Amino acid sequence: MPLYVTRLAQFPYFFKLITLESASSLALSIFYFISIWLCFNAEEFTESSWFYLGAFACFANFVLYAADFVIYLRMWMADQRAARADGATYEYPSYGAP
């Protein structure tokens, strides 16, 4: 078995992250396309509900982008805390100093 396969098998969270990132990217792309299409074509429709639907799609796009940002910010903060905690676990020799 190649080395990279065994190393990636040690990180099941990595695969969940890829799935989460792919799903969020797909959802963001779909909402972005719908919002652009509906907002540009809102003048062609006689009802104003299409404009509101386009505005809702834009707002949903914003919410998804904000949630994506918060998720990755929390992951970054957790990585920073873990790096700080790992460095604090090393005990340096004091050579008799208190």
Image (spheres, rainbow, N blue to C red):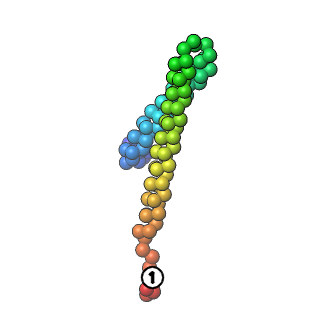
Residue depicted at x 43% and y 64%: 85
Q: Position of residue 70 (x, y in %)?
A: 48, 45
Tag 1: amino acid:
Ser
Callout 1: helix, strand or loop? loop
Q: Residue furthest bottom?
A: 96
Residue depicted at x 57% and y 13%: 45
| Whether residue 75 is situated above or below residue 36 in the rendered picture | below
Q: Classify residue 16 as left or right of residue 63.
A: left
Q: Circle 1: is it few (<14), some (14-19), or many (20+) Cα within 10 Å?
A: few
Q: Position of residue 21 (x, y in %)?
A: 47, 37
Quadrant location of residue 58? top right
Q: Position of residue 89 (x, y in %)?
A: 41, 68
Q: Nearer the viewer, residue 2 or 45?
A: 45
Q: Classify residue 32 as left or right of residue 90.
A: right
Instruction: Give the labeled residue for mark 1.
Output: 94
Residue depicted at x 45% and y 82%: 94
Residue 44 shows up from this direction = yes
| Whether residue 34 is situated above or below residue 15 in the rendered picture | above
Q: Classify residue 8 as left or right of residue 35.
A: left
Residue depicted at x 44% and y 59%: 82
Location of the C terminus (image quadrant): bottom left
| Whether residue 29 is situated above or below residue 80 in the rendered picture | above
Q: Position of residue 34 (x, y in %)?
A: 54, 23
Q: Nearer the viewer, residue 38 or 49?
A: 49
Residue 6 shows up from this direction = no
Quadrant location of residue 32? top right
Looking at the rendered structure, the number of numbered marks drawn on it comes to: 1
